[in-house]
């Protein structure tokens, strides 16, 4: 009986060693979105999955004008683009964050979420209007130290000033 157990253990060990050596011999798959070779001559260009460079990445802004209304003093909303595809800031009394897509002069915000602290009526109204305008954003312009965001159903753009570092 003992010899059968030893024989069985020997076979299991051999199979385990074989499986490990085969696993080590194979090359792991490349990470997602990584090009493994240059496109062949005469074929269509390789598709890029990188986010296009934008003058917005790494910038921070303070809202000065909310589509024709001056932002309330002491509780000015902010807008930050910390890295490609991400946005955050302060609505008036709540922090928000989400995703942003920029292509040329077009801009769209999605997956927006915010904290839910109670606001006074004036701040709450300003914050709701501001976040709605961001959700409805269609295009933007940067003029010197000013950022203009145009949103559907708003006659005038949101006007931001670059935030001092």
Image: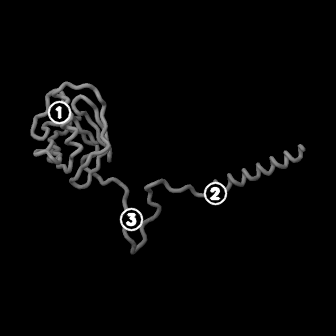
Kindly identify which residue carries mark 2. 25
- Distance from Cα at disc 2 to Cα at disc 3: 30 Å
- 145 is higher (above) or lower (below) than 51: above
Task: Report if residue 82 is visible in the image.
Answer: no
How many neighbours does mark 2 have within 10 angstroms: few (below 14), some (14-19), or many (20 or more)? few
Kindly identify which residue carries mark 1. 126
Q: Position of residue 22 (x, y in %)?
A: 66, 56
Of the two numbered discs 1 and 3 on the same chain, state the one appearing first in sequence. Answer: 3
- Residue nearest the observer in this picture, 83 or 156: 156
Kindly identify which residue carries mark 3. 46
Q: Quadrant of residue 28?
A: bottom right
Task: Report if residue 80 is visible in the image.
Answer: yes
- Distance from Cα at disc 2 to Cα at disc 1: 61 Å
Q: Secondary structure at mark 1?
A: helix
Of the two numbered discs 2 and 3 on the same chain, state the one appearing first in sequence. Answer: 2
- Tell me what residue is drawn at x 14 percent, y 41 percent: 159
Q: Secondary structure at mark 3?
A: loop
- Residue nearest the observer in this picture, 134 or 141: 134
Left or right of 47, for residue 125: left
Of the two numbered discs 2 and 1 on the same chain, state the one appearing first in sequence. Answer: 2
């Amino acid at each position: 009986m003992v010899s059968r157990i030893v024989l069985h253990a020997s076979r299991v060990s051999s199979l385990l060693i074989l499986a490990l050596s085969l696993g080590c011999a194979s090359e792991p798959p490349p990470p997602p979105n990584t090009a493994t070779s240059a496109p062949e001559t005469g074929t269509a260009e390789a598709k890029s999955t990188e986010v296009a460079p934008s003058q917005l990445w790494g910038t921070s802004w303070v809202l000065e004008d909310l589509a024709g209304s001056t932002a309330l003093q002491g509780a000015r909303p902010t807008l930050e683009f910390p890295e490609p595809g991400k946005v955050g800031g302060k609505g008036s009394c709540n922090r928000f964050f989400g995703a942003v897509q920029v292509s040329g002069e077009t801009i769209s915000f999605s997956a927006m979420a915010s904290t839910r602290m109670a606001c006074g009526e004036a701040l709450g109204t300003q914050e709701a209007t501001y976040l709605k305008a961001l959700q409805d954003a269609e295009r933007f312009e940067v003029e010197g130290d000013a950022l203009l965001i145009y949103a559907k159903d708003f006659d005038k753009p949101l006007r931001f000033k670059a935030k001092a570092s």
